[in-house]
Amino acid sequence: MKNKIVLILIAIFYGCNVEAEYSNYTESNHDAELRLAQWNIGHFSFGNLSNSTIDEINFYNHYQQYKDMLNMIDADVLAVCEYSEIFGKNETGEQYSREVLFNEYPYIYEGHQSNYACNALFSRIEINNVRSNNFFSLNTNYYYITADLNISDKNVKLVSTHLAFNKDDDQYALLQIEELLYLFGNEEYVIMMGDWNVKDVDIFNLFVNAGYQLANHGEFGDFVTFSPKKNVRNRVLDNIMTKGLTISNVSVISKDLSDHYPLITTFKIDERIDGVSEQKSSSLNSNKSLNVSH
């Protein structure tokens, strides 16, 4: 009974969160194959601090390493956890991440930072109705971003999150996963991506039972996304789940720029959504920032 009451309250309060400004640019019928990536970037400090440690001496070396990584990821939509607005300092002062690293993405959304929790979205295709949402089931610093992708005139709900960490068990993660599954249970097309902070990797089976396909710990196998340099119980932490869309390829880039490795997926939209144009989307020239309005 208590769980039912909580879910009812979640439904009532869902939507009463931080709104975002977004572009009205419209482009329909995107490429029939999209490349998505999830990366906990560790605040450009290998996850040891909640802010960047890149100084003037090391700025250009680190800048090139991160740019090379982003070129390898080559994602149409990239979700980033433990994001920092400031990438580092060079001889002219502090440099903004969106301007020096992610400037090739025309659609940028930077969520608010609260201690380690900070999520961001970078997209080559239009994202609408972007917002940050607090978890109702658990009062922590961690939150999730929602956005709409229009693909072949179908609305695909995108969810990007970083779940709360609990050193003893998966109680926090379970509460937040159950909330997300409830909230988007009636959506036909959903992409969820994030750092799920689970200790028991089989918790991901909750998504399978709800009709999702797993990029990690599913038919493609287990991909280690957490660095072996740190001692944890489970290293399969990052995952991308889709409902109504078919994942066709999964990979990880095991390069130590963070304590997490980027998880990359490709999915073929035309397998489950009819009428998708095969023509490549035209490139977008302007950088449209989607900043949180507080």
Image (spheres, grey):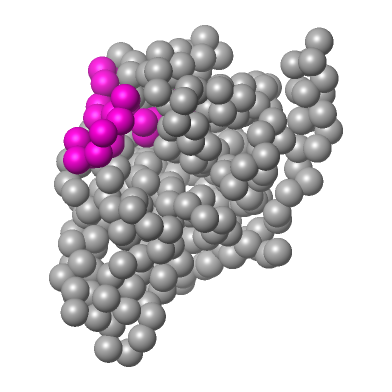
Q: Position of residue 125 (x, y in %)?
A: 46, 52
Residue 279 visible, this angle: no
Q: Which residue is drawn at the image coordinates 69% and 31% (left, top)?
A: 137
Q: Which sits in the foreground, 46 or 187?
A: 46
Q: Which sits in the foreground, 156 or 81?
A: 81
Q: Is residue 201 magenta?
A: no
Residue 42 visible, this angle: yes
Q: Which residues are magenta?
A: 220-245
Q: Position of residue 38 (x, y in %)?
A: 37, 42
Q: Is residue 128 above or below residue 38?
A: below
Q: Which residue is drawn at the image coordinates 55% and 51% (left, top)?
A: 127
Q: Is residue 237 magenta?
A: yes
**The quadrant where residue 11 appears:** top right
Overall secondary structure of the magenta section: loop
**The quadrant where residue 86 appears:** bottom left
Q: Is residue 92 above or below residue 89?
A: below
Q: Which residue is drawn at the image coordinates 19% and 36% (left, top)?
A: 228
Q: Which sits in the foreground, 104 or 202?
A: 202
> For the image shown, how many numbered marks are present on the structure?
0
Q: Is residue 141 above or below residue 2?
A: below
Q: Is 60 situated left or right of 17 in this image?
A: left
Q: Which residue is drawn at the image coordinates 44% and 38% (left, top)?
A: 194
Q: Is residue 107 above or below residue 184?
A: below
Q: Position of residue 291 (x, y in %)?
A: 59, 65
**The quadrant where residue 184 appears:** top right
